[in-house]
Amino acid sequence: LTWETISRPVLKETTYFRPLVFATYVLETKYFGVNPLVSHVVNILIFIVNIFLAYFLSFFIFQKLKIKNLAWLVAMLYAFHPTLVESNAWIAGRFDLLCATFLFSALLVFFSRKKTGIFSDLLICSLFILGLLCKEMAIIFPGLLIIYYVAVNHGNSLLNNIKDFLKNNSRLLIFLFLTI
């Protein structure tokens, strides 16, 4: 488990930087050898965790919107949606799975916090960093936060919602953008 091993590009002549996923591959190989069954089982376990995270995320969103709880339906749609087959069937799909795990976890911390605090902001930022170390797609996270805030605070105008979000979450946004 060396830095060279986990920081090398995914493909030659690319600049992908995904060391966290490569670290899981290296550790898996170290303890179980080269065994595709183990890799598939690990991916399935990560996917099951993501299903539960999707459930809890939708639960918080439905609760905030005062809509009848359909979190189980969201979790089942996530679990059986055909576009997610590839990330589970291919061992290389772990990039997407781990990125989703960390972004879902960061969103869950954001949704479930009672008030803003430096500890929750640092935890959200840390999960965001872990997501970035899995796949570059995690860069969309700050935008997801703004979209969520605007969606659940639909009583105000769009511009007022964005202003409120920026005012109430300025420290978190500063941490996130310093991370990038």
Image (cartoon, rainbow, N blue to C red):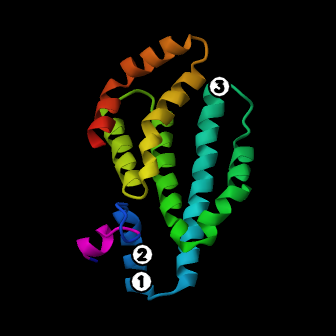
Reading the image, the residue beneath label 3 is: 65
Asked if residue 61 lies left or right of residue 128, the reply is right
- Dot 1 and dot 2 residues touching (CB under 8 Å): yes
**Inter-mark Cα distance, 2 to 3:** 40 Å
Rendering coords of residue 73 (x, y %): 75, 45
**Residue 87 in view here:** yes
Rendering coords of residue 90 (x, y %): 59, 72
- Which one is earlier in the sequence, the residue at label 2 or at label 3? 2
**Residue 109 in view here:** no
Reading the image, the residue beneath label 1 is: 29
- Count the marks: how many? 3
Residue extent of the magenta highlight:
2-10
- Dot 3 and dot 1 residues touching (CB under 8 Å): no
Residue 25: image tag: 2
Indicate whether residue 6 is drawn in magenta: yes
- Which one is earlier in the sequence, the residue at label 3 or at label 1? 1
